[in-house]
């Protein structure tokens, strides 16, 4: 079974703090993704990575950065947390079927982040 | 940019009723299509997917979806729902290269016993 784990299920931070969310997958997937899930808005892609040290902006990258130093680990960084970043954050990974074709994404359990 | 529309935000059905959830996307080129499901308290997981071939695809738990290219649609169907199908369903479209996937806003399905 593919396993995607996220470092925390629940996190509470203060405005202005630097926040690190970690994601680890154990299936040697090339692709990794960070989404935020908000009621009524579905999943919105923040960043994704198709290889180590490679990253691409998603639809809502502002206020976030990412790091992928190892294939199995993809970190999401909130440089200075704000209240509008309170959300559920989902990490996912997938195999690559070629340069432009992905495959099923496997999701982690999510981290519910509250910024006070 | 790709957009994905799920017309129904909240659907309530009785057990044994038939289900159809709509999904439309905007990009007219080559697409890969997915339906994901999130059961209460569980991870998002794949229900079914379409990459090519037969436009009628079958997934887990008796679900199926039909890709109609001319209508830019990929509607999800199940002939007879069960209480255990209560979940949130997301349509997703991969297009434009770089394996970027755009999700719809989701449909919450509540099945009443």
Image (cartoon, rainbow, N blue to C red):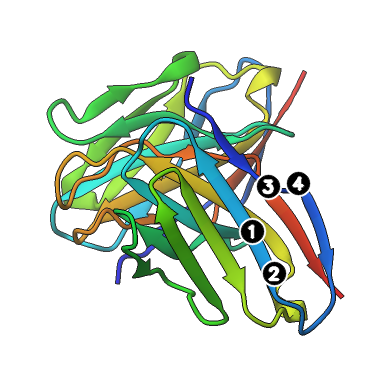
Kindly identify the residue that appears in the image at 71 percent across and 63 percent down: A87
Q: Are marks 4 and 1 in contact (CB under 8 Å)?
A: no
* Residue annotated with mark 3: A7
Q: Chain of mark 4?
A: A
User: Is B23 in front, or is B37?
Assistant: B37
Ranked by sequence position, the earlier of labels 2 and 3 is: 3
Residue B65 disc label:
none
| Residue placed under numbered mark 2 in the picture | A19
**Dot 4 and dot 3 residues touching (CB under 8 Å):** no
Which residue sits at x=74%, y=69%?
Answer: A86
Label 4 to label 1, Cα distance in Å?
10 Å
Q: Is residue A38 visible?
A: no
Whole-number angstrom distance, CA of label 2 to CA of label 3: 12 Å
Report helix, strand or loop for mark 4: loop
* B10 versus A49 height, above or below: above
Q: Which is nearer the N-term, disc 4 or disc 1?
A: 4
Q: Tell me the chain of label 2.
A: A
Q: Nearer the viewer, residue A108 or B30?
A: A108
Q: Which residue is mark 1?
A: A21
Foreground tag (4 vs 3): 3
* Residue, disc 4: A9
Quadrant of residue B42 within the rendered picture: top right
Q: CA distance from mark 1 to mark 2?
A: 7 Å
Q: Earlier in the sequence, mark 1 or mark 3?
A: 3
The residue at the far front in this view is A69
* Chain containing mark 3: A
The Cα atoms of the two marked residues, 1 and 3, are separated by 7 Å
Left of A33 or right of it: where is A39? right
Q: In which quadrant is the C terminus of chain A drawn? A: bottom right
Query: Given contact means CB atoms under 8 Å apart, are the residues at marks 1 and 2 in contact?
Result: yes
Q: Nearer the viewer, residue A76 or B43?
A: A76
> Same chain, marks 4 and 1?
yes
């Amino acid at each position: 079974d593919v396993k995607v784990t996220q470092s925390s299920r629940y996190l509470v931070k203060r405005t202005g703090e630097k926040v690190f969310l970690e994601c680890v997958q154990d299936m040697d997937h090339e692709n990794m993704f960070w989404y935020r899930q908000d009621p009524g808005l579905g999943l919105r892609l923040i960043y994704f990575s198709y290889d180590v040290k490679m990253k691409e902006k998603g639809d809502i990258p502002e206020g976030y950065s990412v790091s992928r130093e190892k294939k199995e680990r993809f970190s999401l960084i909130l440089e200075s947390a704000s209240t509008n970043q309170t959300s559920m954050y989902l990490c996912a990974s997938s195999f690559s079927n070629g340069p432009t074709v992905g495959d099923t994404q496997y999701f982690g359990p999510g981290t519910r982040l509250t910024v006070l | 940019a790709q957009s994905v529309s799920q017309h129904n935000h909240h659907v309530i059905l009785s057990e044994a009723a038939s289900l159809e959830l709509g999904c439309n996307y905007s990009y007219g080129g080559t697409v890969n299509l997915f339906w994901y499901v999130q059961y209460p308290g569980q991870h998002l997981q794949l229900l079914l997917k379409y990459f090519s071939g037969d436009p009628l695809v079958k997934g887990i738990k008796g679900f199926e979806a039909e890709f109609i290219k001319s209508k830019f649609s990929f509607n999800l169907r199940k002939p007879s729902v069960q209480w255990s199908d209560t979940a949130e369903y997301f349509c997703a479209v991969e297009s434009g290269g770089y394996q970027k996937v755009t999700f719809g806003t989701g449909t919450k399905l509540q099945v009443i016993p």
